[in-house]
Image (cartoon, rainbow, N blue to C red):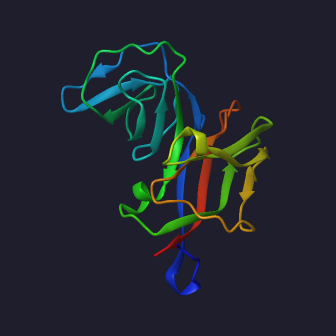
Amino acid sequence: MNTWDKKNIIIDRSRLYGTGALNGTLANSAVINNGDGTVGIVITAHGLIDGTHIIIIGTTNYDGIHKITVADANTVNITAAYVAETPAGTETYAIYFDMYNVLHMLPGGWRILQTRLTLDAAGADEALSQTLDHNSGDTWNVPLGSVNANGALGGIIDRTQYSDYLGSYDGLVMNYANTGGVTWGLEFLYEILL
């Protein structure tokens, strides 16, 4: 059993930024065969940046966690074998955060301490939320926190009082609609059990 021995942990942070929603739907447009081992997924006005990890849900061929590169304002590229598919417009994506993709290694476990959303201007009055995407399957997925995010401060989901740790392949699915279209910064503060 893993325990939080303070001699065997490190505290670190990761940051993302963008101008679109942290989650949304894929457009009702055909997946693009780039011919180089990547495919283009159409997400209208996505506002994401290169290197962001997203989780795609609801497609026939492209579900899962993907590191994106931005093709243009409405298309992101992911590494995947091309299979013809046209999403119906109901399939979803969300920013995804996990230790495997951040550290490129498997720690003994990790614990999210805080998630901070900062906005460059007052946005719409809407919630920032995070949900555990448990490696064992949907039955174990649970909400980890939610906060009303508005104004330049945005919001902070504080989990410092919780001692639960997550497995190496567990991740966080982030939701924030950003209907105000402001530029956002997202910071994750976490502890890693070595």
The residue that appears at 38% across and 40% down in the rendered structure is 68
75 sits to left or right of 189: left
x, y percent for residue 49? 45, 42
Q: Quadrant of residue 38?
A: top left
Q: Nearer the viewer, residue 163 or 125?
A: 163
Count the numbered circles shown: 0
In the rendered image, the vertical position of residue 128 relative to residue 34, given as above or below: below
- Residue 66 x %, y %: 39, 40
Relative placement, left or right, of 18 versus 156 is left
Q: Is residue 123 above or below residue 165?
A: above
The residue at the point 35 percent across, 19 percent down is: 31
Residue under the point 42% across and 13% down: 29
Q: Quadrant of residue 64?
A: top left
User: Observer-nearest residue: 65 or 123?
Assistant: 65
In the image, farthest residue toward the left: 36
The location of residue 71, given as percent across then percent down, is 36, 31
Q: Name the residue at 59% across, 38% down.
A: 22
The vertical placement of 190 against 122, above or below, is below
Q: Position of residue 121 (x, y in %)?
A: 72, 44
Q: Is residue 93 found left or right of 116 in the rendered image?
A: left
Residue farthest bottom in this picture: 7
Please, is residue 141 above or below residue 109 in the view? Answer: above
Q: Nearer the viewer, residue 157 or 181?
A: 157
Q: Is residue 37 left or right of residue 173?
A: left
